[in-house]
Amino acid sequence: MKNLGPKSSEWLVSVGVHTLDDVVKLGVIETYKRVKAAYPEMLWGLQAALLDIRWDELPDDIKAQLRKELEE
């Protein structure tokens, strides 16, 4: 997947996430939560992959919304 390195991809596969369609079905937050060793950049990378942009180009307002959703 775009924005994710080999280790992140390995973690996703280990929890049954193989494609972007899997991320869409589960949602970014749920996908992120399933990967227990996840780091914040992985959350940004997942959302950015869905938007087809680089993770470091993800707007701050989207990052803030993801943080809020993660805390709920």
Image: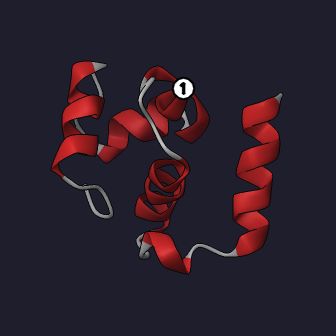
Residue at (79, 53) in percent of width and height: 65
Residue at (42, 26) in percent of width and height: 35
Residue at (27, 31) in percent of width and height: 11
- Percent position (x, y) of residue 70? 72, 35
Image quadrant where one finds the N terminus: bottom left
Kindly identify which residue carries mark 1: 33
Callout 1: SS: helix
How is the rendered protein coloured? secondary structure
Q: Is residue 22 above or below residue 53?
A: above
Which quadrant would residue 37 be assigned to in this image?
top left
Q: Is residue 39 above or below residue 53?
A: above
- Percent position (x, y) of residue 71? 80, 32
- Percent position (x, y) of residue 43? 52, 48
Image quadrant where one finds the C terminus: top right
- Percent position (x, y) of residue 58? 58, 73
Which quadrant would residue 23 be assigned to in this image?
top left
